[in-house]
Image (cartoon, grey):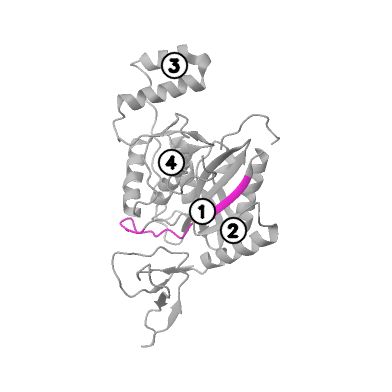
Amino acid sequence: MPLEAPPDEEDNLEEGNLPFFVNKNGFPVEEATWERMWKHASKIHPDAKKEIEQIKGCSSLNDVPMPAVPVLYPQSSVPNYLHLVQMYIQNLRYNHTGTQLFEIKKNRPLAGLMDTAKEMTKEALPIKCLEAVIVAIYLTNCLPTVERFPIGFKSQFNGHHYYHVVLGIMYKGRFGALGISRRSDLMDKPLIYKNLHDLLEDYNHAYLQYTHTLKKVRIGGVIPHDMCSQEKIQWGVCSVNMLKSNHVERRRKLERYGRDLKSHVTYVATSSPSTKDKRMTLPPRRENTMAVPAPNHLYPVSTRTTQSAHIVRKPNSTNHNYEVRI
């Protein structure tokens, strides 16, 4: 087994070198998928086989309440709405069935992933971390002043590698995150961090609390707010090796990337990805134009058309001796 799974598969197929299944046949869930989940439950809880059989054979189980999808009202503040989004994700609950119920292909266009997010809000079933990121993107598309970008983690414990992902957010120069995890301090973070370095050091500290060694952090590009966008999410633009870099090097690299995010400028890049020197033009001002280089590492590049690109200004616990799964 390689030390690092391929980027398209690391969140979908493995969890600490232990495979878990993905429901690729949609809904309603097929009988074979149900049997696989029951078998997984029996394996994890060998002393509860009687209870599992009782639940499995019961035809009058109580309905599980469905959480209400948060609504952004005109009077709602951005931090309050982000809190509602996080509470909704948590109310969906973490998926412990051993089967990811929604198939997430990370190389799909954003529009396709948003269709999957709609299905997740319709079914309101338990989710894993990658699914939570897609739901968070879907529910925050209505916040044009909030920048979103994925943050991926690779940690090691007892010889096993673990992968985790959250949705980083930036609003008014402050950083935070949305997501879900088995551990409360490894999912969302409030909008209180002045820079990316402080945000990631908080996650690093949380990993250490569970005796995990955080090996690598990957920060993706800014995600557009267009529900119909054919852009693909850039999952790993800035990579930080937490073991081979010291504190000063990490701070310098993350602060540089964070300054790009804080520029409060959205770049709509439509030039060909094969073009080495991509440039953006400002909208006309007093019949004059200016050509400025764009930080293409931050924003996705469309391959559908070749158009002029413009800058659009935006408003301003103790150690555990058992294996801990993140």
Q: Residue at x 42, y 69 (%)?
A: 267
Q: Earlier in the sequence, mark 2 or mark 3?
A: 3
Q: Is residue 292 above or below residue 99?
A: below
Q: Circle 1 sits on which residue?
A: 168
Q: CA distance from mark 1 to mark 4?
A: 20 Å
Decide if residue 161 is on the left or right side of residue 84. Answer: right
| Residue closer to the observer: 232 or 172 | 232
Residue range (magenta) = 214-231
Q: Circle 2 sits on which residue?
A: 196
Magenta span contains residue 120 = no
Residue contact at pointers 3 and 4, CB within 8 angstroms: no
Tell me the SS state at disc 2.
helix
On the image, which quarter does residue 314 sit in?
A: bottom left
Image coords of residue 254 (percent x, y): 60, 61
Q: CA distance from mark 2 to mark 4?
A: 26 Å
Residue type, numbered disc 2: Leu
Tell me the SS state at disc 3.
helix
Q: Circle 4 sits on which residue?
A: 12
On the image, which quarter does residue 66 sit in?
A: top left
Image coords of residue 127 (percent x, y): 43, 37
Residue type, numbered disc 3: Ile
Magenta span contains residue 222 = yes
Residue contact at pointers 3 and 1, CB within 8 angstroms: no
Count residues near mark 1 (Cα–Cα under 10 Å), then give few for <14, some for 14-19, many for 20+: many
| Residue 52 badge | 3
